[in-house]
């Protein structure tokens, strides 16, 4: 067992749009630092849970709300420091292209100890819009979910709508939960939703504008139980 908690240094180069991030850092620490150093104009596309560590996450893929525009976290890795079985620290050049390929999706634990990643950062607008809406079976959850399957992957890449099905405690029913992030303001999102997915019935009051880094907290903190309003 190797504790990497102190290898948590994050160095952001906002001009070059890159960062070195130590294997002991969490996604949340990386998101915060990137936003802070870039005045909310850069982001890193990775998973929804801020407490996940970058060591395992980036080596296995890493998907989240920026994935349609900017792919997986592993796709944005441009260099790495990896300690091999002989204690040598390798970088992208010295590890060779096969190993560098393998640690970006194949799980780094099979190959050595990842010390740090160098990653590309991506542009985000100062304002993003998020919403979470819940539909019961009586509100056509089944039909809406069916439509979502047909259109979600064809929407503009600035918009990610995720859908989940959830049982309702103590009741023999379930609901569909749709959570979304749009890289832009609500004034552009609403006409888009009206045109491409009117069945979901998203209203202005369902939407919240915020910075991208705030959205990373929003997605994690949304409490389905409190917000289901099913009493
Ligand atoms: C609450 C939660 C939410 C999640 N949300 C998402 C999501 O939105 N999107 C997504 O894509 N995934 C998500 N995941 C999955 C997550 O990406 C994986 O569990 C990932 O492997 C976590 O990496 P870790 O370093 O935190 O975990 P660990 O359990 O510490 O590590 C996972 C594996 O990687 C190895 N490893 C970790 N660090 C290193 C290192 N420095 N060197 C060598 N090997 C290492 C470990 O030995 C282990 O085999 C989520 C997981 C949880 C628990």
Image: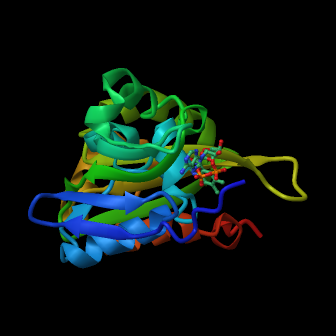
Residue at the far left: name it: 15
Q: Quadrant of residue 82?
A: top left
User: Residue 9: x and y, percent?
Assistant: 40, 70
Q: Nearer the viewer, residue 111 or 72?
A: 111
Residue at the far top: name it: 98
| Left or right of 210 on screen, residue 177 | right
| Left or right of 189 on screen, residue 145 | right
Q: Nearer the viewer, residue 65 or 168?
A: 65
Q: Residue at x 26, y 60 (%)?
A: 19
Q: Residue at x 18, y 72 (%)?
A: 38
Which colour style is shown?
rainbow
* Vertical arrangement, residue 99 with respect to residue 109, above or below: above
User: Residue 101: x and y, percent?
Assistant: 37, 26
Residue at the far right: name it: 170
Q: Nearer the viewer, residue 90 or 103?
A: 90
Q: Nearer the viewer, residue 66 or 35?
A: 35
User: Residue 217: x and y, percent?
Assistant: 48, 71
Question: Is residue 140 in view?
Answer: no
* Vertical arrangement, residue 161 with respect to residue 10, above or below: above
Q: Quadrant of the C terminus?
A: bottom right
């Amino acid at each position: 067992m190797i504790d990497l908690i102190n290898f948590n240094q994050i160095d952001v180069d906002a001009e070059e749009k890159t960062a070195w991030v130590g294997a002991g850092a969490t996604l949340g620490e990386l998101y915060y630092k990137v936003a802070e150093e870039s005045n909310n104009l850069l982001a890193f596309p990775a998973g929804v849970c801020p407490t996940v560590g970058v060591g395992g996450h980036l080596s296995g893929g890493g998907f989240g709300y920026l994935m349609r525009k900017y792919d997986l976290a592993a796709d944005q890795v441009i260099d790495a420091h990896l300690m091999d079985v002989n204690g040598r620290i390798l970088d992208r050049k010295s590890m060779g292209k096969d190993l560098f390929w393998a640690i970006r999706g194949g799980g780094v634990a099979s190959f050595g100890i990842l010390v740090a990643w160098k990653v590309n950062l991506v542009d985000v607008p100062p304002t993003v819009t998020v919403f979470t809406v819940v539909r019961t079976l009586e509100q056509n959850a089944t039909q809406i979910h069916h439509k979502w399957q047909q259109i979600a992957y064809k929407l503009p890449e600035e918009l990610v709508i995720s859908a989940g099905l959830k049982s309702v405690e103590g009741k023999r029913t379930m609901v569909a939960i749709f959570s979304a992030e749009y890289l832009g303001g609500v004034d552009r999102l609403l006409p888009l939703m009206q045109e491409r997915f009117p069945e979901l019935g998203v209203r202005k009051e369902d939407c919240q504008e915020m910075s991208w880094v705030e959205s990373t907290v929003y997605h994690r903190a949304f409490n389905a139980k409190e917000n289901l309003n099913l009493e």
